Image: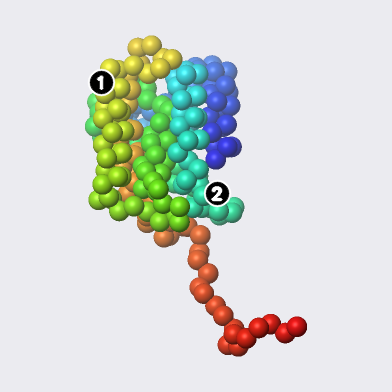
Amino acid sequence: MVLLAASLPVLFWLQTNLPDGGLSLAFQPAVLMQGEAWSTLFTSMFMHHGWTHVLMNAVAAFAFGPPVARLMRGPEGAASFLGFYIVTGLVGAVGYALVHPDSFDAVGGASAAVFGLMGAAFRLLGRRDGTLRPLTDRRFLLMAAVIMAVNIGVGLIGLVPGAAGARVAWEAHAFGFVAGALLIGPWLRLLGPRRRPFDSPPNLGDPPA
């Protein structure tokens, strides 16, 4: 989790040294709909519009990622966690492209993936044993409603912190959040840690002295 959060500003620093400032890494929905530049759905998750933008995402990832990361331990768990992060980010990007199929705006940022972690983390609120809250749970629905209201409100203002003139892709955030909340259960069942079945010897007496 620390490495993921720390990688965002490092990657942004590398982005600022690119000839086009990383613009070619962003995706444009209209271009995607023409069947071109599909790789930008992936690369766009690793570019940002400014230091404020990337630092906000890094802090949010560090805040909401640990509860999810704790469910996926070991090297396989680390790969599973990274896969979950990427998949929710991709869902957010695709969702935005479907809502704005004619847009040539350059879209980028880790926000959709971070919102995916947030959606999964909200299903763990108050659960110390790693079990998930049902999607119909009142506490989960309340927190989801609050974060979506804030997300839409900020989106309507149309301001990306540290990037004057850029609009907030709040739809991508929403798709990422929903993906995280819905996928965390099946993801853990398929790619989570394998639970060892309970076992005991046939002789339950005290061990030999």
Q: Nearer the viewer, residue 195 or 41?
A: 195
Residue 7 in the image: state x and y as whole percent: 56, 32
Q: Which residue is disc 1 drawn over? A: 156
Q: Position of residue 112 (x, y in %)?
A: 38, 34
Local packing at callout 1 (Cα closer than 10 Å; few below 14, some 14-19, many 20+) is: few
Q: Is residue 161 above or below residue 33?
A: above
Whether residue 135 is visible: yes
Identify the residue at horizontal 46%, vertical 25% (top origin): 56
- In which image quadrant can residue 177 be found? top left
Left or right: residue 193 versus residue 186 is right
Dot 2 corresponds to which residue?
78
- Amino acid carrying mark 1 in the image: Leu
Q: Disc 2 and disc 1: Cα gap in Å?
A: 36 Å
Task: Please identify the residue farthest to the bottom as the structure is shown.
Answer: 203
User: Nearest the camera: 185 or 106?
Assistant: 185
- Going 37% across and 22% down the picture, which residue do you hit? 106
Figure quadrant of the C terminus: bottom right
- Secondary structure under tag 2 reads helix
Residue 105 image offset from top left, x and y in percent: 33, 21
Q: How is the image coloured?
A: rainbow
| Residue in the image at 45% along x and 22% along y | 53
Quarter of the image with the N terminus is top right
| Outermost residue, top side | 164
User: Is there any visible trace of residue 187 in the rendered image?
Assistant: no
